[in-house]
């Protein structure tokens, strides 16, 4: 597995080995997806250093069987959605692109919530235009803006859904209480919170999603690359499993719960192929529990 190249060559649709999940009960996705935040410039701002490589990453992801891509209007801003359309439009059947609105970007590494109804409406229209779609399969409220009543923000998404511009609605970085409240306003099919093998602060939200059969999309599934490198806190354990630390971190998420849809991000085909090979990391459940006890969690 550490040399993932043969697995990738042997099996072109490798990602499918991660299993499937039905978002909203009918959008069938391969559980191991792709996060498209890293195909932008430094500070998630502007053009990526290698636009051609970013296009190759997206095309290779689809070749390897990934059919769930996560992005947001604020990545770039606009850049990630534009590159997705450039690389993949006209989209293959069954490709689910999840995007988000609710942030504005004054500059690199700066993120400001804006949940005003006018902003959310125009953000959704801009995403439709950039992605060249008539309808967005999964539209996620990037953050609930504390300055705007949640009813107004979710009510706007409900209107966009009624107009056919959005199929399903998801939330991002929320508590169980916020999800419960949101669901009194509009149906919610997924939650995207920060979560990884070394960062389990959202365990209660994951358990809620599992109980309610909602997709749980962990962002920073590789702890933003901190579990990937040679300094990784899980490198020794990964070596025992003949896996790379990234593969072990992703396989751990896939075993942790059937509602987890990891979306590792990368700007490099080499890393993408390594990550997708995690779908093939098969482990006996008893050994897995032993491994789980050895893994660091915060
Ligand atoms: N909802 C939210 O608020 C929110 C916030 C952040 C992110 N997200 C979403 O979650 C996705 C995943 O998060 P993320 O991309 O920030 O973090 P991540 O997937 O945890 O880690 C990505 C980082 O790890 C590196 N990496 C990936 N695979 C590697 C490998 N095999 N070996 C070594 N390094 C590797 C990447 O660098 P290279 O480019 O060099 O591979 C990149 O810097 C994003 O793309 C985005 O779609 C959502």
Image (cartoon, rainbow, N blue to C red):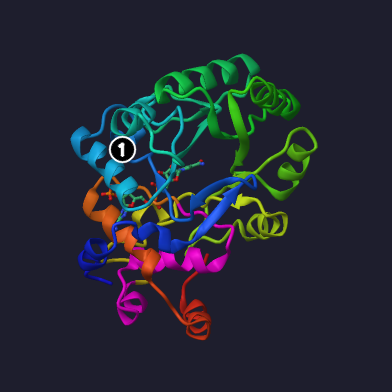
Magenta range = 235-262
Q: Quadrant of residue 267?
A: top left
Q: Main secondary structure of the magenta part?
A: helix
Question: In front here: 132 or 278?
Answer: 132
In this rendering, the answer to whether 5 lies above or below 70 is below
Other residues around mark 1 within 10 Å, as few (<14) / some (14–19) / many (≥20): many
Position in image of residue 145 (x %, y %):
63, 29
- Residue 86's spot in the image, x, y percent? 30, 28
Question: Disc 1 marks which residue?
Answer: 39
Q: Is residue 148 visible?
A: yes
Q: Position of residue 194 (x, y in %)?
A: 52, 51
Residue at (71%, 50%) from the top-left corner? Answer: 176
Furthest-front residue in view?
93
268 relative position to 297: left or right: left
The answer, for residue 141, to whether it is visible in the render is no
Is residue 269 or residue 228 the one in the foreground? 269
Callout 1: CB less than 8 Å from ligand 1 = no
User: Residue 24: percent from the left, percent from the top?
Assistant: 64, 44
Label 1 SS: loop
- All told, the count of numbered labels is 1
Look at the picture and state if 255 lies above or below 140. Answer: below
Residue at position x 33%, y 34% from top? Answer: 88
Magenta segment: does it hold 251?
yes
Give the quadrant of residue 258. Answer: bottom right
């Amino acid at each position: 597995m550490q040399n993932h190249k043969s697995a990738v060559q042997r099996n072109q649709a490798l990602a499918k080995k991660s299993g499937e999940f039905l978002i909203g009960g009918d959008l069938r996705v391969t559980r191991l997806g792709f996060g498209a935040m890293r195909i932008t410039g430094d500070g998630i701002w502007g053009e990526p250093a290698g636009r051609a490589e970013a296009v190759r990453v997206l095309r290779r992801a689809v070749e390897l069987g990934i059919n769930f891509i996560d992005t947001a209007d604020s990545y770039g801003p606009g850049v990630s959605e534009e590159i997705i359309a450039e690389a993949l439009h006209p989209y293959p059947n069954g490709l689910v692109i999840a995007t988000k609105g609710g942030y504005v970007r004054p500059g690199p590494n700066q993120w400001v919530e804006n949940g005003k109804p006018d902003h959310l409406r125009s953000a959704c229209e801009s995403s439709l235009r950039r992605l060249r779609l008539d309808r967005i399969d999964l539209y996620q409220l990037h953050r609930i803006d504390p300055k705007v009543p949640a009813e107004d923000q979710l009510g706007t998404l409900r209107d966009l859904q009624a107009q056919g511009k959005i199929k399903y609605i998801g939330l991002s970085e929320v508590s169980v209480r916020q999800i419960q409240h949101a669901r009194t306003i509009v149906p919610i099919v997924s939650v995207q919170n920060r979560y990884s093998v070394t960062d389990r602060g959202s365990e209660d939200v994951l358990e809620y999603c599992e109980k309610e059969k909602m997709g749980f999309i962990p962002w920073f599934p590789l702890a933003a690359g901190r579990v990937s490198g040679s300094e990784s806190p899980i490198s020794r354990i990964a070596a025992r499993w003949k896996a790379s630390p990234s593969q072990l971190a992703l396989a751990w998420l896939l075993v942790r719960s059937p509602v987890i849809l990891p979306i590792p991000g990368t700007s490099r085909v080499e890393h993408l192929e390594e990550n997708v090979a995690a779908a093939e990391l098969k482990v006996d459940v008893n050994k897995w529990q032993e491994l789980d006890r050895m893994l660091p969690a915060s």
